[in-house]
């Protein structure tokens, strides 16, 4: 296959980023915008040895799952990957995505992945937005980055975001034009306004606006503050200083211009304080569904010690603290830990403690020092890269009866679950939750339970009449170990291959 060839392809599946997968004479082509079951015509824009990438030119036979995207920028913007797919089809795709990862990467056989828990109204669900600000041919541009680039697609009315963002962006745009405030230019590291971060309390209606600047001060900022104050629900207006030549959006320093340093939201009656740096699930409606499932999986009776690793501002921690004897949360972002402590105090929880630091540093250190020797339940909610190997090893040493793994990436989830299975845990349940409708991403709650390590199996094989090499004996050992593990759920710690006389 060569670049710029035009191919007719039958789309067989969707890739991890929601792109269609088709084959031409055994050659795999990834085509964004194509759906399984479709016959399409595509231009091969990148050709590697065994696979390539295509641009969708024409749909010859459409899928029954195809629908017209509501957003005119859906094909260009990097925010949505699946607006062209009916929502029911999206949920089926995400269930299959989790299933494929658990089987292919995790090596789990006969795993049952439950149907994805979706939303009744899968739009305007995001409570956080980060809009890049740049200089375009027609002046100041605000929107989102195009797929796989830092080219801004102008967008002030995103169907996934809260509608108030349109009003916020318009006020900022007009302010910058009126006072000739420059937009940031990534190539030259010049210009002032880099990004706009907004947060909305879904259940409280409180709004935060944070302007990220490449400087020390925003000229005429009092005028902008006065205008933003007119928006109903406005509770916090801040500047964030980021003068680094980096792709990281937020700098370390925040300056409060007006209102509170953090906004509040409530989830299932628990009050949470959210600052610009805080990790807080972007879909609070589905967060309730997700955390209820995590709490259900933990099945707490009231006497348990629980570790909540990657705890953010303590959202899962406080859910668990309602039922547990003690909860200890660890989070790498110091501001989030302070939010977590404030949240615990504000809600009257005296059984929740928090520590700042990387979980893979804090937990092994506390275990080595003897300050943490056991946990009844461990909950992890790591970033996309999954859990650090050292952390997994320490969790195994702590020997919790239950481990609840909340994941935003089924590939790293499957990898980590496989390690835990090999070290004494069995998979009990897999429940995906659609936190991110119209995108290819999916959140999953997995329950693993500790096997009874007192149980063991000894297998004696009659190899007297078989002429086996050492390599064949090793292969036989592995086959039997895999078989026993798959069919009994027991961990095989030793397997004896002995010569037995007739």
Image (cartoon, helix red, strand yellow):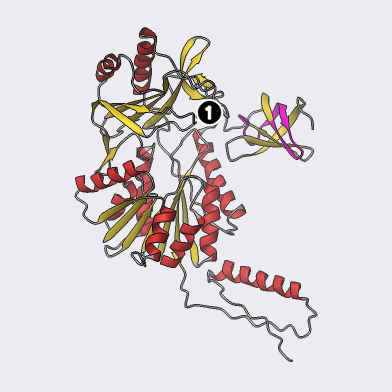
Front position in the image: 440 or 258:
258
Q: Is residue 449 above or below residue 153?
A: below
> Could you say where residue 172 lies in the image, as x and y percent from the top left?
36, 16
> Could you say where residue 145 lies in the image, as x and y percent from the top left?
51, 25
Residue 399 visible in the displayed image = no
Front position in the image: 255 or 277:
255
> Could you say where residue 421 lies in the image, as x and y percent from the top left?
52, 63
Magenta part of the chain: 32-53
Q: Splitting the image into 4 quarters, where does residue 459 fall?
A: bottom right
Q: Which residue is mark 1?
A: 78
Q: Splitting the image into 4 quarters, where does residue 475 fall?
A: bottom right
The C terminus lies in which quarter of the figure?
A: bottom right
Q: Residue 46 in magenta?
A: yes
Q: Is residue 298 above or below residue 172?
A: below
Residue at 48% across, 51% down:
114
Mark 1 burial class by Cα count in 10 Å: few <14, some 14-19, many 20+: some
Q: Is residue 307 above or below residue 459?
A: above
């Amino acid at each position: 296959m060569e670049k710029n060839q035009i191919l007719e392809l039958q789309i067989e599946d969707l890739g991890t980023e929601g792109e269609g997968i088709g084959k031409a004479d055994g050659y795999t082509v990834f085509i964004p915008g194509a759906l399984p079951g479709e016959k399409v015509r595509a231009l091969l824009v990148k050709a590697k040895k065994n696979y390539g990438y295509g641009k969708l030119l024409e749909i010859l036979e459409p899928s029954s799952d195809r629908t017209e995207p509501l957003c005119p920028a859906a094909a260009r913007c990097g925010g949505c990957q699946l607006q062209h797919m009916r929502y029911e089809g999206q949920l089926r795709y995400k269930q299959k995505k989790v299933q494929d990862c658990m089987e292919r990467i995790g090596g789990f056989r006969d795993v049952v992945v439950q149907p994805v828990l979706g939303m009744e109204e899968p739009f305007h669900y995001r409570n956080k937005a980060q809009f890049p600000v740049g200089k375009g041919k027609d002046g100041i541009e605000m929107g989102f980055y195009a797929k796989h680039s830092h080219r801004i697609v102008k967008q002030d009315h995103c169907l996934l975001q809260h509608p108030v963002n349109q009003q916020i962006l318009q006020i900022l745009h007009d302010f910058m034009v009126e006072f000739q405030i420059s937009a940031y230019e990534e190539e030259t590291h010049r210009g002032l306004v880099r990004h706009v971060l907004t947060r909305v309390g879904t259940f409280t209606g409180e709004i935060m606006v944070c302007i990220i600047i490449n400087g020390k001060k925003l000229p005429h900022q009092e005028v902008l503050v006065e205008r933003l104050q007119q928006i109903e629900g406005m509770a916090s207006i801040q500047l964030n200083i980021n003068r680094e030549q980096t792709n990281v959006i937020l700098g370390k320093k925040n300056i409060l211009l007006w209102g509170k340093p953090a906004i509040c939201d409530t989830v299932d009656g628990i009050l949470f304080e959210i600052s610009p740096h805080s990790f807080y699930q972007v879909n609070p409606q589905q967060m309730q569904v997700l955390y209820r499932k995590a709490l259900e999986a933990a099945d707490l009776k009231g006497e348990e010690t629980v570790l909540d690793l990657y705890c953010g501002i303590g959202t899962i921690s406080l859910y668990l603290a309602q039922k547990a004897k003690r909860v200890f949360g660890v989070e790498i972002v110091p501001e989030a830990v302070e939010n977590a402590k404030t949240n615990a105090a504000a809600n009257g929880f005296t059984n929740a403690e928090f520590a700042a630091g990387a979980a893979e540093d804090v937990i092994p250190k506390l275990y080595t020092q003897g300050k943490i020797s056991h946990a009844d339940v461990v909950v992890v909610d790591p970033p996309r890269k999954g859990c650090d190997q050292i952390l997994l090893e320490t969790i195994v040493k702590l020997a919790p009866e239950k481990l609840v793994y909340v994941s935003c990436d089924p590939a790293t989830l499957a990898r980590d679950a496989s390690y835990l299975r090999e070290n004494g845990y069995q998979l009990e349940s897999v429940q995906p939750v659609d936190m991110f409708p119209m995108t290819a991403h999916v959140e999953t709650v997995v329950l693993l339970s500790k096997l009874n390590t007192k149980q063991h199996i000894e297998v004696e094989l009659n190899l007297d009449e078989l002429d086996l090499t050492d390599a064949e004996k090793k292969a036989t050992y592995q086959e039997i170990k895999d078989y026993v593990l798959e069919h009994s759920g027991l961990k095989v710690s030793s397997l004896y291959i002995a010569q037995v006389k007739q």
